[in-house]
Image: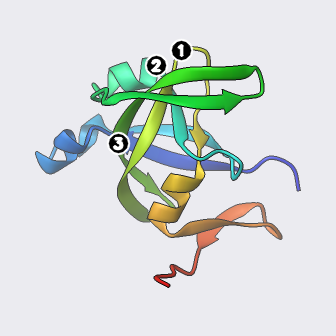
Amino acid sequence: MGHVYASVKFANPRDIEEGRREKMVEERALVDTGATFTTVPRSLAKKLALPIMGKVKVRTASGEEALDQSYAYTEASGKSTVAPMLVSDKMDKTLLGVFTLEALGLTVDTSTGKLKEAEVLLL
């Protein structure tokens, strides 16, 4: 199937709450169903003035590291949510992780390589 990318808009939740939707930033994100958190480059977090809430230890292909944790208003495929995310000093691309996909009620359609609505379960 190859890589799956999605157009995702991010904003500081405070900007959305105060009606400043023009501050949203659109990114081409790699959809990574093997990543727990959505992860954005430090430059995007700074541009959106995202608050840093602490650190999270993660295991990456290059080893273990601690990344800053934040949260952001997120829109993709016509759905929106506020979701936790990590901020990376090493990555220059955005990864859309499982926490955000599930919060949006989206999944990857493996036959098309696009995002589609998922069944949300409360079991």
The numbered mark at residue 89 is 1
Specify few, some or many for label 3: CA neighbours under 10 Å numbering under 14, 14-19, or 20 or more.
many
* Location of residue 14 in the rendering, given as x and y in whole percent from the top left corner: 17, 41
| SS for dot 3 | strand
Instruction: Give the residue pinned by disc 3.
Output: 72
Q: In the picture provided, is 55 more to the left or to the right than 21? A: right
Dot 2 or dot 3, earlier in sequence: 2
Q: Determine the residue located farthest toward the right in the rendered image.
A: 1
* Location of residue 91 in the rendering, given as x and y in whole percent from the top left corner: 62, 21
- Gap between marks 1 and 3, in whole Å? 17 Å
| SS for dot 1 | loop
Kind of residue at badge 3: Ala
Q: Determine the residue located farthest toward the top in the rendered image.
A: 89
* Location of residue 40 in the rendering, given as x and y in whole percent from the top left corner: 51, 30
117 versus 9 height, above or below:
below
Q: Determine the residue located farthest toward the bottom in the rendered image.
A: 123
- State yes or no: discs 2 and 3 in contact (Cβ < 8 Å): no
The numbered mark at residue 42 is 2
